[in-house]
Image (cartoon, helix red, strand yellow):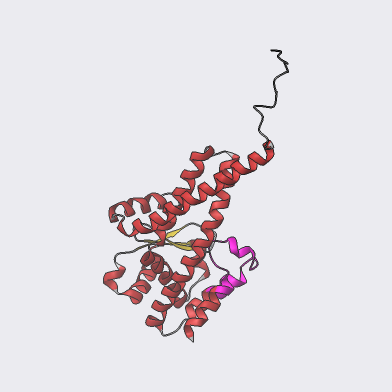
Amino acid sequence: MQFNYKAPDTSVNVSSVSPLKRGIQLIASLSIAVLVVYTLLGLLINVLAPYLPASLETRMGKAILAEWTVEEDDATVESYQEILEKLIGQEEASVYEIRIIDMDQVNAFAIPGGFIVFSTAFVEAFEDEETVAFALGHELGHFMNRDHIKAYGRSMVLYTITGLISGEESASSTLFLDVLSKAEMKFSQSDELKADAYGAGLLYEAYGSYNGGLEFFDYLRDDYSHGQLASYFDSHPHPEKRVKELKKLKN
């Protein structure tokens, strides 16, 4: 028997798929897997948020507050506390603590442990009682819906996922964090509109009008530098949209 020898096929270990196509497939698969994990963990956090121990919340809140300079503005804190009592009663208001922090941006937010935080810029910008009352009511809405716990929990998931993928400071980690955080921003807009409605309800019960909320958003609208499209990626809805939603409550 005669054998015909031939050279081996040198392409036997080479994939028929181009490296570029394979790389795109891997990145797409990884992105989908990350989004699925993030979504599932986010849903789990939403379920568990109501059961977080109060002592742990307080420790979290104090740790977060430590990142800012807290102003010794007793007069403002006392006046805001009185407005809070007008909204929900003295006994329930005693559960919350108001803090003023040094910040140039007009802002107010709720953090774990019952802390309602206002920036010095907010204090300087708003003197009308009803406007302050609406802002307080809005933050109370976040507490009622446990948005503050959910938001911090989702942020922890974001940083954990990106850190596990490629390291906290890597370029790819930053890319994943940017993509996921934009999804998080839109989630937060829904929470903001619900908090607006809750705050507006408290405002109307205490003052008989929604004027404080409308004035607050009018201020934000005049100072808003983004367009409607750009606001899609903001943590808060566009002021114009918030005004429209608030006006619906009046009808």
202 vs 72, nearest the viewer: 202
Q: Residue at x 28, y 72 (%)?
A: 90
Residue 3 percent location from the top left of the image: 70, 14
Vertical placement of residue 238 versus 181, above or below: below
Q: Is residue 172 magenta?
A: no
Q: Residue at x 54, y 49 (%)?
A: 32
Q: Residue furthest left?
A: 91
Q: Residue furthest top?
A: 1
6 vs 33, nearest the viewer: 6
86 vs 182, nearest the viewer: 182
Q: Quadrant of the N terminus?
A: top right
On the picture, is 34 further left or further right than 6? left
Q: Residue at x 26, y 70 (%)?
A: 91
Q: Place residue 228 in its image quadrant.
A: bottom right
Q: Place residue 141 in its image quadrant.
A: bottom left
Q: Which residues are magenta?
A: 217-241
Residue 168 seen by the camera:
no
Residue 199 percent location from the top left of the image: 42, 74
Residue 9 percent location from the top left of the image: 70, 23
Residue 130 seen by the camera:
yes
Residue 149 percent location from the top left of the image: 39, 57
Q: Residue furthest front?
A: 1
Count of labels in the image = 0
246 vs 82, nearest the viewer: 246
Q: Residue furthest bottom?
A: 251
Vertical placement of residue 66 versus 213, above or below: above
On the picture, is 18 further left or further right than 61? right
Vertical placement of residue 225 versus 41, above or below: below
Q: Residue at x 67, y 29 (%)?
A: 14
